[in-house]
Amino acid sequence: MAGKREKKQPKAPKAKGYIAGAGEIVEQDVGETLRKNFMPYAMSVILSRAIPEIDGFKPSHRKILYTMYKMGLLGPGRKKSATIVGEVMKLNPHGDTAIYDTMVRLSRGYEALLHPFVDSKGNFGKFYSRDMAWAAPRYTEARLDDVSRELFKDIDRDTVDFVDNYDSTMQEPVLLPVGFPTVLVNANTGIAVGMASNICPFNLTEVCKTAIALLRDPQADLFETLQAPDFPGGGLLVFDKAQMEKIYETGRGSFKVRSRYAYDKGQNCIDVTQIPPTATIEVIVEKVVELVKQGKLKEIGDIRDESDLEGLKITIDLKRGTDPDKLMAKLYKMTALEDSFACNFNVLIAGAPRVLGVRALLEEWTAFRVECVRRRTHFDLRKKKEKLHLLLGLQAILLDIDKAIRIVRETEEEAEVVPNLMIGFGIDQMQAEYVAEIRLRHLNREYILKRTEETSQLEKDIQELEGILGSKTKVRNIIIAELTEIAKKYGKPRRTMLLYADEVEEAEISEEIPDYPVHLFFTQEGYFKKITPQSLRMSGEQKLKEGDAIARQVESSNAAELLFFSDKAQVYKLRASDFDDTKASVLGDYIPAKAQMDEGERAAAMVVTKDYSGFVLFVFENGKAAKVELSAYQTKTNRRKLLNAYSDKSPLVCALYLPEDREVLMTASSGRMLLFHTGLIASKTTKNTQGVQAMNLKKGQRVLSCAPFAEGDLQNPGRYRKKLPALGALPDGEETGGEQLSM
């Protein structure tokens, strides 16, 4: 109908659990998303999880230790670990497993710290074993170790700030007022976002002495009191002063730690009792077994883990005649029995991560400890002043106790008692409140005299505390006295012994190669065969690719080294032992593929040697010849490829290996032949020398071949002997051509 509005259709009811905007695709700037989401996460990991602070603890450590302190676990009694973990969750809501794992690392049973903070009972595993897992928290018990007293000694005296926990139901300390530099005494490792921290432990006595030395002289030599890191697992630290100075100065660097062992002559075995902090028993055993299977360690009969309640022990049974010291030198180089520890002293200072050296870290700790002592002194001063103030009020009523009683008794309203006392004795409200709260039984002269006797002592104490606050020297002396006491009370001998780097003999690891006679064959197409004499005697004809021929045959041994010269002026070094023994009935290994030559490169010549004596004669198409000592190709490292092996100015005709100088016969495309003695050419150590002109060539001519000369190869050899350089001579009718023209 006209004039009437149409009724709107009612909207469909929203389904239960409907979320507005769900499923919609919204374009977001990647940079903005990273700033909003990833950056806060990264900062949280850096500041609240992975990086320790100047008190030496990460937040997770601090929450566990503080909870145990509040549970009264500084005494002799222990509590179930499950109970402790449950209490810690009031401060650390990251799950019971993460909390227990952290507590295990702080424990005495786990043996990861020089001075553990948790005294454990039960199976807490071992840090040096990957498979030795700790028991569940319902089976183990723990309390705080005695050294933890130095962490909480002044915590109730306003030495550090407190903040609310995650749900604001209780408070926790921001830092612990540690009485010694725990940041250097116990190891700490953490991986954050874009940064990490790895602090090695030092001996507590040495750290305390060093902190004292720096308090007295900021320029003190650290090495006089702080020898080197000290690990709970012991071992031998390979000490290099230059490296250690770098670590002490910058907080970055690395050093090596070796295992300690003893040789049992009666059982002919080695007992390893201490290993590097970065290694585990299982990793070491698995690596040794692997090397034995590969044939790289033939001196070992057996290896087993014999660790028990007495401690770590890896036993290595030796074969008869094995030198234990030489074997351990090899094991140090080939296994984790010697490993590097990389230092990265990254610590949160005032909420910002900084990498500091030992001196700078101790200076920061000293500044932190000075602040703790000043706050503690100020707290004690305030308390003593308050007490003195109250006692002065109590002293005021000493003159007339009866008057005080009368004022209280005659005052009709309770609220007027305090004001009347204030008026009657001329004291302030706080003093009057204190007097009014005294029990009736204490309103005697003896009690009041005893209490007021403290007044003079309090005045002395206040004067002393004010003197401490006004003197930096007195504060430093207090810290020095405390450090001296802690070092005396908790100090232990070094566990990690020093082994000076210049006294360490590095073992030369040479793979033992079985040595036996072999025949080596190299073909013109680049195929290679290694055949034993017995197999060669039983074989028939050599199988070759169509059009291929044997270019070189050498009787040698399996330990020989092979140099394959390519047509691109490069040489590839292999060993005869790199090739499998084969038969004449197979094609053999294709050298360009085996040596991983460049694309399109082919093997042109082979040289076999054991001691790199003799020389190689390179003959080029332009008639030049170069004599290079074979020792020029010897390298100390196992390099597989050498560039510029010979001159590339003219194509290579042949590369002849000659143990000593002899005559060679050169043939040109013109048919002329030249016979000369290689002694006429001076040897060079420069590999890519162009050599000297041996054969003069006319335009368009080139050298075709060069081969060692033997008596009988020519009917009239004197005809072809010439002074270098020479054209050579054409063969006469008496010569039997063929052999002398072939390589």
Image (tube, grey):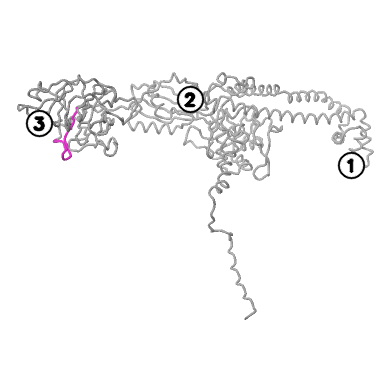
For marks 1 and 3, the one nearer the N-term is 1
Task: Tell me the residue that label 3 is attached to.
Answer: 738
Nearer mark to the viewer, of 1 and 3: 3
**Residue 2 on image: x %, y %:** 63, 80
Instruction: Return the residue nearer the eye: 452 or 602.
Output: 602
Range of the magenta residues?
540-554
Write down the quadrant of residue 296 in the picture.
top left
Instruction: Please name the amino acid that badge 3 sits on.
Output: Gly
Quarter of the figure with residue 464 = top right
Tell me what residue is drawn at x 61 percent, y 24 percent.
490
Principal SS element in the magenta part?
A: loop
The spot of residue 209 in percent (x, y) is: 60, 21
Magenta stretch: residue 541 in it? yes
- Please say whether residue 112 is one of the residues in the magenta stretch: no
On the image, numbered disc 1 is attached to which residue? 415
Q: Along the horizontal axis of the image, is 235 left or right of 329?
A: right
Which quadrant, please, contains the C terminus? top left
In the image, 715: left or right of 284? Answer: left
Label ID, residue 235: 2
Q: Earlier in the sequence, mark 1 or mark 2?
A: 2
